[in-house]
Image (spheres, rainbow, N blue to C red):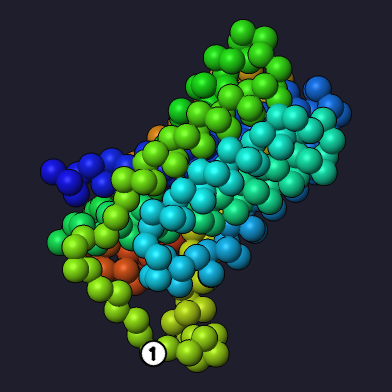
Amino acid sequence: MKRYAILLAAVSVHLCLGGIYAWSVFVTPLREAFGYSAAQTQFVFGTYFLVQTILMIFTGPLLDRYGPRPLAVASGVLFATGNLVVAFAGSTFAALWLGYGVLGGLSVGCGYVGPIAAGVRWFPEHRGAICGVGVAGYGAGAIVLAGLAKALFARAVPVLHVFRFVGLLYGAVIVLAGLCLSMPPGARVERAAFPRRRLIGDRRFWQLCVGISCGTVPGLAIIGSLKPIGQSLGAGLPEAIAAQAIGFYAVGNATGRVLWGLVVDRLGGRATVRLSLACVAASALVVAVSG
């Protein structure tokens, strides 16, 4: 039963961290309250993912050395701190950028890899599926946070107060769930002797980078402004329907992560990446033709 509790803790951490996909819910209130431009809110969103990506290069070795628990706790503290910075000083763009973009990105950089690694170690016979289930929480995070934020905005709660509430609640959940994470007894880290400069010159590394980029960049390009995009189409979708688009996106995101994890277990990584990119290209073609 312990390994299922750890899997639940891993999903809980990712469910909180994945709230970034609900960013567009906050875009309109921030712009209306403080006059931020679309470029500014997107810059915060982009900074979040840039910081997260860079930090993961360094948290991987830290995970091997210290395990997932301290990194997850640090993630929760950083998440709460970042949101509180926004809550108390978010009327200035620098504070919004620092709190949500930089500290929020650091939070995910610390907390993303550990829960997945712990889950996979406890379920070695289903590595792809467990990885998919773990990160499905990250994909579904937008459903929870978008619904929570929408309920608070409906009660006329100011946007900065929402950041404070989310920071304290989510930060506590991440810390508590992170304390439940651990590796199996006797688990040993297998490290390959593979120098970084050799990695940079390896064709497979760049194939992986291109494959992941083509699979993720299209989604990230629109998710940060999904709600405003919906409201700007044609005569403009009603706010409630535009907000629901975030939920539909999150459902597809979470479901796809689980399904592709199952596919990896059957077809292997290379075939799965090719099939996934073929689906992305086909869906883009359908949208282009129907539009």
Q: Nearer the viewer, residue 284 or 84?
A: 84
Q: Quadrant of the N terminus?
A: top left
Q: Is residue 73 left or right of residue 79?
A: left
To which quarter of the image does residue 229 belong? top right
Determine the residue positioned at 51% across, 49% down. Answer: 75
Determine the residue positioned at 27% across, 60% down. Answer: 183
Q: Report x, y in % for residue 282.
A: 45, 53
Q: Amino acid at mark 1?
A: Ala
Q: Nearer the viewer, residue 26 or 187?
A: 187
- Circle 1 residues within 10 Å: few <14, some 14–19, many ≥20: few
Q: Report x, y in % for residue 243.
A: 57, 24
Determine the residue positioned at 35% across, 85% down. Answer: 192
For the residue labelled by badge 1, is the local secondary structure a helix, a strand or a loop?
loop
To which quarter of the image does residue 270 belong? bottom left
Can residue 44 be seen in this snapshot?
no
Determine the residue positioned at 55% across, 44% down. Answer: 77
Q: Is residue 68 above or below residue 94?
A: below
To which quarter of the image does residue 235 belong? top right
Q: Is residue 267 left or right of residue 252?
A: left
Q: Report x, y in % for residue 41.
A: 75, 40
Q: Is residue 171 above or below residue 238?
A: below
Q: Report x, y in % for residue 80.
A: 58, 38
Which residue carries the number 1 mark? 193
Can residue 48 be seen in this snapshot?
yes
Furthest residue to the top? 155
Disc tally is 1
Q: Quadrant of the C terminus?
A: top right
